[in-house]
Image (cartoon, rainbow, N blue to C red):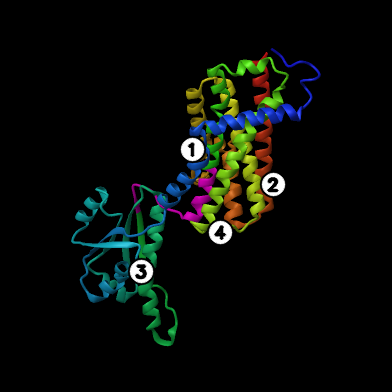
Amino acid sequence: MSDPPAQSQRLSWRRLRALTVKETRQLLRDKSNLMVGLFLPVVLILIFGYGLSFDVRNAPVGIVSQDTSPTARDVVAGFYLSPYFTVTELHSMSEAQRLMRAGRIEAIVYMQTDFSRRLAAGNATIQVLVNGVDANRARVLEGFAQGAIGQWSVKRAAAGAGGAMPAPAVRLETRLWFNEANTSTHFLVPGLIVLIMTLNGALLTSLVMAREWERGTLESLFVTPINTGELIASKLIPYFGVGLCGLAMCLLAGKFLFFVPIRGSLLLIILISMLYLLVSLSLGLLISAATKNQFLASQIALITSFLPALMLSGFIFDLRSVPAIVRAISTVLPPTYYVEALQTLFLAGNVPGLIIKDVAVLIVAAVVLLVLIRINTRKQLV
């Protein structure tokens, strides 16, 4: 049944209010939706915020020193004193390599038998082998290893004549095994907000229209004078409110639990988040209207919204290091621009060029999705 021509095409605030109240009451009656919308953000921000950390602490390191002189022990003393390493003294490289392959140590520090003689000659070398399964973590371990050796260099410089800083007498040779490494909570929390807003938005509304089709209640709306715009708005408004509550809890947790700095405009963060929430809700509603099945809609919503936001938005992986085809796919995904906007506003401040681009893309995405929902819903109401 198509919309009646003149009267139904005019926006009626009375009809919109009645539909919104009806959807809100249905939302309040459905405890599972309230659990997802209100408590899931808190659970996720706590679990991921505390559980996800790329910071390196107490990394197991094996030291293989074939030079037993006091000088050699002084050079590697920084590893024993550092909170970033847990040191195990090993007797041979073969034993160290076996432990590395077994995953029991993450790095090997190797000093040859003639280390002291080379140090006196000014060309001493220490070899550091790092488990590179996690590339970011491997780079962090390399930096900490350089810092540990650097402590000895600083002490040696301070003891030198005139306090002049000589050129480093110890050169570090690093090699990566297997491949990878880490980042901090300040970088993670903005990305976690993106994931939560994506899950909170798309998953909730992906069930709305499908549930009505399964229960047969959508057909009863066909004989009413409501138009397509009012129907779509009434489905989005209650969940938009729930999403804003989730956003508020995420921002409060980021600021007061994880002490993430907000160097940009908080108002901009909220406005861009509201825009992305509209995109996420619209995507879920489009999936719901197209599938007419709650289980199928929820699965498609996870695949098309949450997983791309997790894997392809730059939240976990630096997009500059991924293959070109993956990078091309990421450029058409709204979460990519929301991640960039939030990380910029949280950590760098107001950068107009980036923010304007990100906002423009999100506006286009919202308009396209709303148009597609209207077209799809109009076809279903005919």
| Earlier-in-chain disc, 2 versus 4 | 4
Mark 3: secondary structure: helix
Residue on which the image places disc 2:
356
Q: What stretch is highlighted in magenta?
A: 176-195
User: Does residue 312 appear to the left or right of 117 in the view shown?
Assistant: right
Q: In which quarter of the image is residue 168?
A: bottom left
Specify whether residue 93 is painted magenta.
no
* Amino acid at circle 3: Ile
Q: Nearer the viewer, residue 38 or 274?
A: 38
Give the distance between the C-alpha atoms of the residues marked 2 and 3, in whole angstroms.
Answer: 45 Å
The answer to whether the residue labelled 1 contacts the one labelled 3, judged by CB atoms less than 8 Å apart, is no
Q: Nearer the viewer, residue 84 or 13?
A: 13
| Earlier-in-chain disc, 1 versus 3 | 1
The answer to whether the residue labelled 4 contacts the one labelled 1, judged by CB atoms less than 8 Å apart, is no
* Amino acid at circle 2: Ile
* Amino acid at circle 4: Pro
Q: Where is residue 222 in the image (x, y as percent from the top left)?
A: 67, 16
Residue on which the image places disc 4:
261
Residue on which the image places disc 3:
149
Give the distance between the C-alpha atoms of the residues marked 3 and 4, in whole angstroms.
Answer: 32 Å
Other-residue count near label 2 (Cα within 10 Å), few / some / many at <14 / 14–19 / ≥20: few
Mark 4: secondary structure: loop
Give the distance between the C-alpha atoms of the residues marked 1 and 3, in whole angstroms.
Answer: 51 Å
| Earlier-in-chain disc, 4 versus 1 | 1
